[in-house]
Amino acid sequence: MMSNKCCWSSCQNILQQYNSFRGSLKPCNREYPAWHWQVHNVARTQFPHPRHIKTTFRDLKEFLENKSKDDTNTLYADLLKTAKFDLVVYMVCRHSWGGVNVDFRIKQAFGELARKRIKYYCTFEVENHVTAYNQKYNCVYPVNPNSDLVNEYFERIDAGEYLKHEKYAFRKNHLSKQETFFTSPANRIRYENILLLKGIEILNKVDTLNVKSIRPLGYTVKSHKTLGLGTQFFTWRNIPNNTPLVFWWENRGWHPLFSVKNRGQKGSKVMTLFDGL
Amino acid sequence: MNGQTYNKSEAAIFKSTKATFGGLSNMASGYTIFVNGVIILSSEALYQALKFTAYPDIQHKIISEKSPMTAKMISRKHNDLVRPDWNDIRIDVMWWCLKVKLSQN
């Protein structure tokens, strides 16, 4: 759980790494900025935000495709490539797999020169990249419990005609190489199975599930035939929708730890447990 | 001896990575490759990493290097662990690495 104070303290630490900065966000995002900051709560989610942040990639793309407001009227992407400014993206929480995908998509859209000049920072990283080296898997990523309930649910997942990542849906037994997130590998399996099975029970009570990207362990890309991102990260102001459903889905008798308005059941109260912190 | 003859006027000749056609060199920086969900900074790093398919930790060290030259230097330190069939497959591996580089850059 990350507090407001912790988040901004992390931001300030990153600012101090740039010598020409004097600890203030005021010079940022002006008409011809020397710096441009983007702050994201949790990369790879789309939950509501006062500035209507979409996803990290879409925000970056939208910004880089805009023209600067000075006399040159040049695309920000071109200014970035010629080192006219630095672009720093700070995420409170970042998923390693999603982060690499954003990096590559930026390269595809704007070229290697632009990709190299974007710096990413985060306070907490969820290491969930299934093909990367030595990931901690500090998230809920269960091994296959060989349960009828799970197998039957998994077969029913509708990931559309472009479905992928089916082979990564369940964690291999030997991953992670060294368990550092849970107290033991056995406890990890126990916790993951509880969240997975309960999440499937919750979804099975829904009459018509219209959102293809929702899974028992939280949201994911809808074309991924997986069980959800299983993020274990919460902030003082909200709970990401890519955390397991048990934490935030309120419906048909299930009362989550963090009941959030318009998730699962209309009219659910917004619980502001951490107001004033 | 079998061989292939190249017509100089029809060939893209390069010597330096900074000169004309230098980007075709495996030692050229700035041509990142995305393979199996992993960003690799050069085709040289990819080629060198593929020598050590049984050693993911060595592969990780190689592809973590910023420059193709240092990636090659890391590889040389582990010459004794190169996969035993490397000499039989290396041409095909190089061909594949170059195709990946071309298709993504």
Image: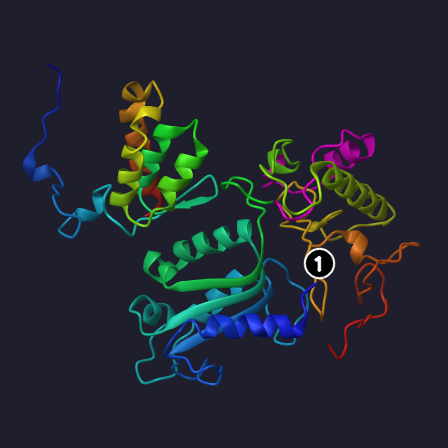
Residue A158 inside the magenta-drawn segment: yes
Front one among B93 and A94: A94
Q: Chain of mark 1?
A: A
- In the rendered view, tell whether residue A140 sits above or below residue A116: above
Q: From where the camera sits, is residue A165 visible? A: yes
Location of the N terminus of chain A by quadrant is bottom right
The furthest residue to the front: A183
Residue A105 placement, left or right of A51: left
Residue B1 inside the magenta-drawn segment: no
Front one among B21 and B60: B60
Q: Amino acid at mark 1?
A: Asn
The furthest residue to the left: B8
Residue A5 placement, left or right of A71: right
Q: How is the image coloured?
A: rainbow
- The picture places residue B90, in percent across and down from the top left corner, at 29, 25
Segment tinted magenta in the rendering: A137-166
Q: Secondary structure at mark 1?
A: loop
Residue visible at 73% across and 77% down?
A277
- In the rendered view, tell whether residue B56 sits above or below residue B101: above
- The picture places residue A132, in percent across and down from the top left corner, at 50, 42
Choose top left, top right, bottom left or bottom right for residue A179.
Answer: top right
Residue visible at 33% across and 75% down?
A74
Front one among A263 and B6: A263
Question: How many marks on residues?
Answer: 1
Residue visible at 41% across and 28% down?
B53
**Would you name the residue on which mark 1 appears?**
A241
Q: From where the camera sits, is residue B44 visible? A: no
Residue visible at 40% across and 80% down?
A33
Front one among A149 and A210: A149
- In the rendered view, tell whether residue B10 sits above or below residue A138: above
